[in-house]
Amino acid sequence: MKDQTLLLRQIHPNFLQNGRVSSQAFRPTPKDEQRLSVYDGDQIDPEPAYRHYTETLRFQSSGVMAVTVSECGTLALPVEPDPTPFPEHVVIDFSAYSKNAVEKKAKQLKAVAEARDWLYRG
């Protein structure tokens, strides 16, 4: 992955509030082991990533937003390939941070993703 590689994040319908994305969309849950799942935009485009997520994996998504490897690096969030579930799978690792720091970093990722806007809407 390069610095400008887009990390494609599926936005669950529950993470939309009054048409706006909540920072929850960019915050890993404890079941995620503090690793946020994204797709490697160098390997798959937003629409096929959405189709894979909703049709193959059978999860819900309102669409795709993205942050870059560089934007994660600015926040000291490591980005690591994790091809075990599927080849394009990547994680953003929040495990070094406290709950408050995770929330702050999630808000910052949400802000840069919102500035980029939706890459695909379902």
Image: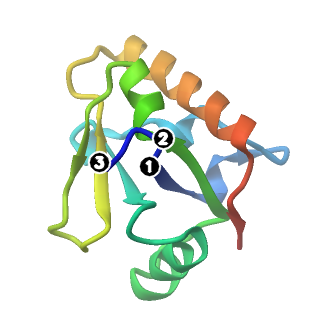
Mark 3: amino acid: Val
Residue occupying image coordinates x 58% and y 58%: 12
For this view, does 110 lie left or right of residue 28? right
For this view, does 20 lie left or right of residue 66? right
User: Which residue position is annotated with label 3?
Assistant: 91
Bin the neighbour count of mark 3 within 10 Å (Cα to Cα): few under 14, some 14-19, many 20 and up. Answer: many
Badge 2 vs badge 1, beta-carbon distance below 8 Å: yes
Image vertical order of residue 107 relative to residue 2, above or below: above
* Cα distance in 3D space between marks 2 and 1: 5 Å
Image vertical order of residue 99 relative to residue 116, above or below: above
In the rendered structure, which disc, 1 or 3, sits on the residue that comes first in sequence? 1
* Cα distance in 3D space between marks 1 and 3: 13 Å
User: Which residue position is annotated with label 1?
Assistant: 5
Badge 1 vs badge 3, beta-carbon distance below 8 Å: no
User: Which residue position is annotated with label 2?
Assistant: 68
Q: Nearer the viewer, residue 42 or 95?
A: 42
Determine which quarter of the picture holds residue 102: top left
